[in-house]
Image (tube, rainbow, N blue to C red):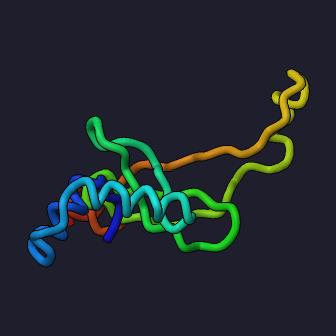
Amino acid sequence: MGAFTVEELAARLESEQPATGLATVYRAVRALADAGSLQKIGKRGSSELYVWCVAEGHHHHLVCTECGAVEHAPCPLGETASAPADVAGYTVLGHDMTLWGLCPACSQREKGD
């Protein structure tokens, strides 16, 4: 499963577990996000967008805007990235970056190949 919203996950679960309510899915997603298994990566419409995130260490994500496929990407920012914060007196605690585009398969379909 690629990137998903809570509503999309609930709809997928409905066919297998019809008695599972939306509130239960929201609680489960919140618990998984708090545990570090899911990560918010943006929004789809007005809903938060999540990815399963089991990669070790600091990294970012590549997300296909067509099919929702997700790849992990190493962080391209070096130590100098926090220089403006240092100058302003900030202590950087973290950062986030998500790259959006088309995966190879969707890119090929887009080109008509």
Residue at 21% over, 66% down: 113
Residue at 59% over, 73% down: 55
Q: Position of residue 83 (x, y in %)?
A: 86, 34
Name the residue nearer the viewer: 96 or 15: 15
Q: Position of residue 80 (x, y in %)?
A: 85, 42
Residue furthest top in the image: 88
- The answer to whether any part of residue 103 appears in the image is no
Whether residue 92 is situated above or below residue 9 in the rendered picture: above
Tell me how many marks there are.
Answer: 0
Residue at 61% over, 46% down: 96
Which quadrant would the N terminus be assigned to in this image? Answer: bottom left
Q: Is residue 47 left or right of residue 19?
A: right
Residue furthest bottom in the image: 16
Name the residue nearer the viewer: 7 or 100: 7
Name the image quarter holding residue 86: top right
Name the residue nearer the viewer: 108 or 48: 48
Q: Position of residue 100 (x, y in %)?
A: 42, 48
Name the image quarter holding residue 22: bottom left
Q: Position of residue 71 (x, y in %)?
A: 47, 67
Whether residue 33 is situated above or below residue 46 in the rendered picture: below
